[in-house]
Amino acid sequence: AFFNIMPSKIMSKWVGEAEQKIEKLFERAKSHEKSVIFIDEIESLIPNRSSSNSSVMARVVPQILAELEGFEERENALLFIGATNTPWLLDPAVLRPGRFDDKVFVGLPDRESRREIFRLNLSEKFLSDDINYYTLSDYTEGYSGADIREICNKASKKRFLDAVKREGESKPISLEDLQQSIDEVSPSVEQKTMKKLRKFEEGH
């Protein structure tokens, strides 16, 4: 069983409601022989309590920490995964052994990965014969997967609007179209952020 949880679905302005949602989430997960709980942007659900003035967080963070205790003693297999771009904002208690035991740094895609991301995003598009995925990969060093998807979408939209103007006569997406889109899309992840992430990884 896979539980994909958004923090916004957990939080509540009513006293005790957020804690009850967390408790019910773990109860549902534990009712299965094997289950996974995945929370994206987990720093918004387990922030550093010393820097948060939220009374809700003062109750929610301990509730989550309590649910994470004793994983290895449970009969049912439960995997708890959190994703974040700002791990330094997490409460230190959740990074201790017995909570998040493994920290996995997922960096920006390398050359081969960027080539594959372009291929996947353009696989169902009308393309010209001059498309070279390795060329596109070389042009986009430092770009994230989401950045590359945006590049492909921009080039596709440009060709679609061009076809509308031509009353249905469509032209394939060319390498030049994609290169122009690359020029219009800046990398969303700054190098200083990557350095900060690597520094955090080395310290943990």
Image (tube, rainbow, N blue to C red):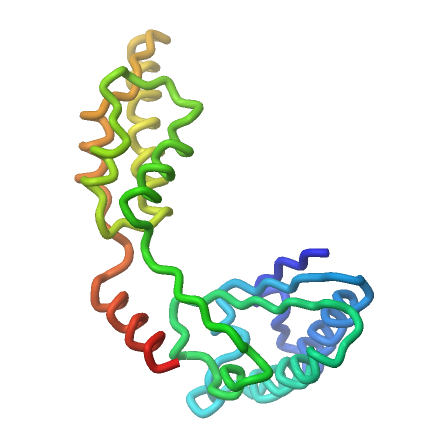
Query: Compared to 186, does 30 lie above or below?
Result: below
Image quarter (top left, top right, bottom left or bottom right) of the N terminus: bottom right
Q: Residue 16 placed where, x, y %?
A: 71, 82
In the displayed structure image, the side of residue 47 where residue 203 appears, left or right: left
Q: Residue 86 placed where, x, y %?
A: 38, 71
Q: Residue furthest bottom?
A: 50
Front in this rendered view, residue 174 or 129 = 129
Q: Quadrant of residue 166?
A: top left
Image quarter (top left, top right, bottom left or bottom right) of the C terminus: bottom left
Tell me which residue sits at (27%, 67%) in the image. Answer: 193
Tell me which residue sits at (19%, 32%) in the image. Answer: 179
In the displayed structure image, the side of residue 138 where residue 102 appears, left or right: right
Query: Compared to 184, does 170 lie above or below?
Result: above
Tell me which residue sits at (62%, 69%) in the image. Answer: 80
Query: Compared to 56, does 178 lie above or below?
Result: above
Front in this rendered view, residue 203 or 43 = 203
Q: Residue 149 placed where, x, y %?
A: 36, 40
Query: Compared to 85, does 64 lie above or below?
Result: below
Tell me which residue sits at (33%, 77%) in the image. Answer: 202
Q: Residue 203 placed where, x, y %?
A: 34, 82
In the displayed structure image, the side of residue 121 where residue 73 appears, left or right: right
Front in this rendered view, residue 77 or 196 = 77
Q: Quadrant of residue 184?
A: top left
Q: Quadrant of residue 104?
A: bottom left
Front in this rendered view, residue 60 or 97 = 97
